Image: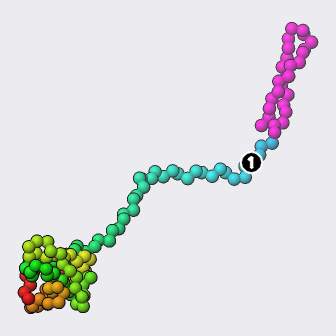
Amino acid sequence: MKKTIKKETESKAPAKKTVVAVSKPAAPVTKSVAPAAKAAPVKETAAPVKKKTVIKKEPPATIIFAKIDIGFGNHLYIRGEGQSLSWDHGIAMDCVGNGLWTTTIKDAAIPVVFKLLVNDLSWSTGSDFVAEPGQSLTVEPTF
């Protein structure tokens, strides 16, 4: 590309001025090495997804009630197999009313097989009792 520079010159006639165009070479054009990179398209993102917290669900508690009057000063115990029970030593039951005893066995995943004892010495007669996990069972033992 050439640039044009205008130059004023005087002619012999004093009233007229003539304009003569003089060409000058333009500066060299430089080429860029690589084209500019295109910007990546902007993706619209949805609201952040919250991770679900996995809560390990525990089996429901197994509740055992015993209806029996064992006399003042005595205490009812439970022995057996299942969560926290043993045939070797008993767990004291709670007296919640006149002739009503209870115990709660948490996290039982298998049936609870048990017998009741007075003062953790005298075994109830008859077959073993069985409570399914999460069941609320009322028994009336005999001694």
Residue 15 appears in the rendering:
yes
Q: Is residue 135 left or right of residue 56?
A: left
Q: Is residue 6 magenta?
A: yes
* Residue 137: x %, y % from top left: 13, 77
Q: Is residue 36 left or right of residue 84?
A: right
Q: Nearer the viewer, residue 26 or 80?
A: 80
Q: How many marks?
A: 1
- Residue hosting label 1: 31
Q: Is residue 11 magenta?
A: yes
* Residue 64: x %, y % from top left: 15, 77
Q: Amino acid at mark 1?
A: Lys
Height in image: 20 above or below 69? Answer: above
* Residue 52: x %, y % from top left: 36, 63
The quadrant of the picture occupied by the N terminus is top right
Residue 111 occupies quadrant? bottom left
Height in image: 85 above or below 30? Answer: below
Residue 129 occupies quadrant? bottom left
Residue range in magenta is 1-27
Q: Nearer the viewer, residue 86 or 22?
A: 86
At 36% across and 65% down in the image, what residue appears? 53
Residue sitting farthest toward the front: 73
At 14% across and 81% down in the image, what residue appears? 74
Q: Nearer the viewer, residue 126 or 56?
A: 126
The quadrant of the picture occupied by the C terminus is bottom left
Colouring method of the image: rainbow
Residue sitting farthest toward the top: 15
Q: Dot 1: within a 10 Å radius of its alpha carbon, few (fewer than 14), some, or many (20 or more) residues?
A: few
* Residue 110: x %, y % from top left: 23, 83
Main secondary structure along the magenta-highlighted residues = strand
